[in-house]
Amino acid sequence: MRSALQAESVFDWSAHTEEVLDKIGQARFGRSRLMNQLWSFRVTRRPDLPAHFHDDMENLHKNLQDLRTLTADNPKQVQILNELTPLIAAQLISLQKGMDDAIAGNASPADSSTWSLPFQPSDRVRDLFNILEKDERTLLAERSAAVRANVARTRVVLIIACALTVLILSAAVYLVQREILLRAAVEAGLRRAQEMLGVKFEGQRAELGHVLEDLHAQIRARSKAEEEVRQLNDHLGRRVKQRTAELEEMNRELEAFSYSVSHDLRAPLRHLDGFSRILQQTYGPQLPESAQHYLERIRSAAKHMSELVEDLLQLARVGRQATRRELQPLRSLVDEARKEVEPDCVGRDVRWEISSLPELEIDPGLFRLIFTNLFSNAVKFTRDRQVATIEIGSFDGNGMSVIFVRDNGAGFDPRHADKLFGVFQRLHRQDEFEGTGIGLATVHRIAQKHGGRVWAESEVNQGACFYLSVPTTSAAAMELKEPTGAAV
């Protein structure tokens, strides 16, 4: 019970952290949206934009107030908000004045080339948002680790309790059997004594009768103890099933949450990229270089966020999708995956070395996704090589087929290999090699669904080799229970 309460408390804190991160994202987006609406109204004079501008400003004030409420117990975050709030308030006043001037008609569309924001975007505001989000993500990581530790402790307690139950039950069965045999022997002895002594020893027979009653009482007590042990075992079994069901439900809720958030982000990201592209194409030559630079950064960020959302959706779909196994030659899947990454190889010398590959009972669509992710990484991390070499092969061992993808690219520090297959885990900076940090987590989850595993070997600047093991027979694969979406 205590472990369950601790798990519930840590889960509540994790949900609180997710809510704080959501409010931070909404505040950031709301601030950018206000600036975009001011620009849009100056250009288009749409009559509905001032109302939207007012609503978004109210929402931004509400998000900042919600952030203060949610972080009131964290002095560091309170201090950050104390510095951040006046900066944003000053910008909002400038934006409101700019909107009022635009509504009053102080500038016409003909002067749009001279328009600028009523203030210079503050790097300090962005830095404060980054510090606030980084601090909250650190808290989320710590609380997630606490959840996993609590689950591990609960599992250990349940295993120990089950072991003790088995020992107690075995001891009870042994004692009951021994008492039954003892009672049978005593009853046989009593019958013989009664036959020998007869009526003459009536008093002694009565005394022996009392002894027999005591034995019956002991047997009844032993039977009652056995029943209590059985009930305890049933109770522990129900608790184990209940706890397992709770953990599975928690995993399903986390997957559903990830899918819902990613799905709901797609539309606004498309709008952001579309409107910024229209603004760049239509008014780009009229904008100053700094504004063009900001527009390009907006489009780049929207593109990266869209890729991240798509990868999250794909990871959620993999977790929810049931595997459809069929006997499939891997060579055809490898060729299809190569065609998908060929656009990234244009203008480069990329050499593919493909050895003989087996037929396996797998889900073709999921395995094609594995090869696409691994090949995309191999092409990306070898782009600094004059001649890029990507090798694909396989071998058998311990009833498993092992497929490997080796490249001669940048590699990575093997000390951090355990982080490689986690969601959002990256071993290179974004400015060195782009990416979302979700592709290898998807590969790991697909391998688990097929009853296998994935791992990697590498040295810095010595290339990398990724291994994927899959059971060679369908019987071996069916013996391994598919996970319900657990991450690395």
Image (cartoon, grey):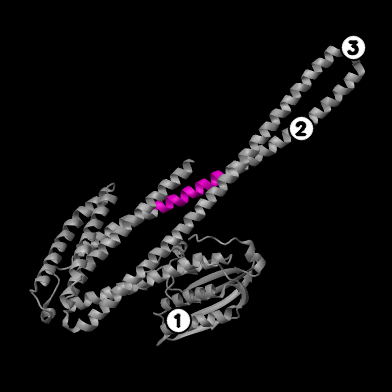
Of labels 3 and 2, earlier in sequence is 2
Residue 89 within the magenta-colored segment of the rendering:
no
* SS for callout 3: helix
Image coordinates of residue 269 in percent, x first then y, are 32, 71
Which of these two is toward me, 468 or 44? 44
Dots 3, 2 in contact, CB < 8 A: no
Q: In the image, what residue type sits under mark 1? A: Val
Which quarter of the picture shows residue 290? bottom left
| Extreme residue toward the left, this view | 106
Which of these two is toward me, 157 or 230? 230
Of labels 1 and 2, earlier in sequence is 2
Q: Which residues are magenta?
A: 142-158
Of labels 1 and 3, earlier in sequence is 3
Q: In the image, what residue type sits under mark 3? A: Lys
Q: CA distance from mark 1 to mark 2?
A: 73 Å
**Between tags 3 and 2, which lies in front?**
3
Image coordinates of residue 417 in percent, x first then y, are 46, 64
Q: Main secondary structure of the magenta part?
A: helix
Q: Which residue is mark 1?
A: 341
Image coordinates of residue 408 in percent, x first then y, are 46, 77
| Extreme residue toward the bottom, this view | 347
**Between tags 1 and 3, which lies in front?**
3
| Mark 2 neighbour density, 10 Å: few (under 14) some (14–19) many (20 or more) | few
Q: CA distance from mark 3 to mark 2?
A: 33 Å
Q: Determine if residue 118 is in view.
A: no
Which of these two is toward me, 317 or 79? 317
Q: Which residue is depicted at the point 18% across and 84% down?
A: 285
Q: In the image, what residue type sits under mark 2? A: Arg
Q: Which residue is mark 2?
A: 178
Q: Is residue 350 above or below residue 93?
A: below
Q: Which residue is depicted at the point 29% across and 62% down?
A: 25
Q: Which mark is residue 200?
A: 3
